[in-house]
Amino acid sequence: MEQRRRRAASLHPEGPDMQRGRRACREPVLKPEVVPAWRFLELRLLNSLRLFTIKINKAKKKKKPTKMSVDPMAYEAQFFGFTPQTCMLRIYIAFQDYLFEVMQAVEQVILKKLDGTPDCAISAVQIRKCTEEFLCFMKGRFDNLFGKMEQLFLQLILRIPPNVLLPEDKSQETHSYSEEEFHLLQKEIEQLQEKYKTELCTKQALLAELEEQKIVQAKLKQTLSLFDELENVGRDHGASDFREGLVFLIQNSRKLQSIRENVEKEGKRLKIS
C-alpha cells in the first residue's frame, strides 16, 4: 500500500485525494474559501451577462420579423364564433405579459441579492440594462417560436378541412349548384324581392283607400241616421211617407221663395213711389 501511495504521489503531485475515482479531475479544485463569496457571485453574474450580450448580438443579426396570417378564415370564424387570428393574438399578448412579469421578478430578486452582498461593483443601472437586453433576446426567440406555433395552430388545429361542412351547411351536399345556376338563382331572388316590394306598395295603397272608405262609410251612416230622424219626425206630425213629405216640403219652400221675391219687389216699388 505504501508503494502504491508513493507511486501515485510521484505521478500526481497535487495529492492522492484528488485522484480518487476514474473520473477524477487532474487540475486543482478552487476551494470556496480562497475567493470571497461576493466576488464569486459577481464573477458569475458578469459571465452570465456577457454570454447573454453575445447571444443578443447574434439574435439581432439573425432576427426575422414574424408575419401574422392574413387569411381571413371566415368559415372557421363561423364555427368558433371568433377568428383564429384573434385567438392567437390573445395568446401572444398573454405570453408576452407573462414574460415581462417574470423578467421584472427576476430583476427584483437579483437586486435583493446584490443588496445583501458587500462591496458589489454591479449597479442597479447595469442590472436594468442587462435585463432589458436579455428581455429583447427572449422576446426575439419567443417571436420566432410563436411564428412557428401559429402556423401549426392555424394549419392543423384551428382550421376546418375543405371537405368538411358545418351542420347548417349540410343542405349543400344534397342541393349542389353550379356557378351559372347560382347566378340564375340570385337573379330570381332579386326579381322576387322586387315583386315583394311592389306588393308591399300596393298593400299600403289599398290600406290607405280602405281607411278613406271607412271615413266615407261613417259619414254615410250619419246621413242615413239623419234621414231616419227626419222620417220619424214626419210620422209624428202626420206625414205618412217621408218621400211625399219631402216633395211637399220642397214645393212649399219654392212657394215661400216666390212669395219672398214678390214681397221684396212690392217693397222696392213702394219706396220708389
Image: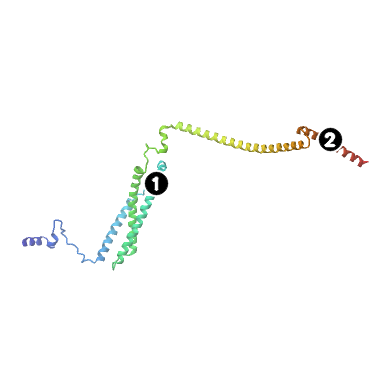
Q: Is residue 214 above or below residue 146?
A: above
Q: Amino acid at mark 1?
A: Gln
Secondary structure at badge 1 equals helix
Q: Residue furthest bottom?
A: 119
Nearer to me, 124 or 108 = 108
Residue 258 position by quadrant: top right
Residue 73 position by quadrant: top left
Residue 59 at what x, y percent from top left?
A: 32, 52
Residue 170 at what x, y percent from top left?
A: 41, 36
- Left or right of residue 17: residue 208: right
Report, in whole angstroms, how far the alpha carbon at label 2 lies from the one at label 1.
99 Å
Residue 71 appears anywhere in the view: no
Q: Are marks 2 and 1 in contact (CB under 8 Å)?
A: no
Residue 226 at what x, y percent from top left?
A: 72, 38
Nearer to me, 116 or 57 = 116
- Left or right of residue 264: residue 78: left
Q: Residues within 10 Å of mark 2 (few under 14, many from 20)?
A: few
Tell which tag, 2 or 1, sits nearer the viewer. 2
Residue drawn at x 90%, y 39% as measured from the top left:
266
Mark earlier in primary sequence (2, 1): 1
Q: Circle 1 sits on which residue? A: 85
Q: Residues within 10 Å of mark 1 (few under 14, many from 20)?
A: many
Residue drawn at x 82%, y 35% as measured from the top left:
252
Residue drawn at x 37%, y 52% as measured from the top left:
94
Q: Circle 2 sits on which residue? A: 255
Residue drawn at x 92%, y 41% as measured from the top left:
270
Q: Amino acid at mark 2?
A: Lys
**Quadrant where the C terminus is found in the figure:** top right
**Quadrant where the N terminus is found in the figure:** bottom left
Number of dots carrying numbers: 2
Residue 6 at what x, y percent from top left?
A: 7, 62
- Left or right of residue 215: residue 259: right
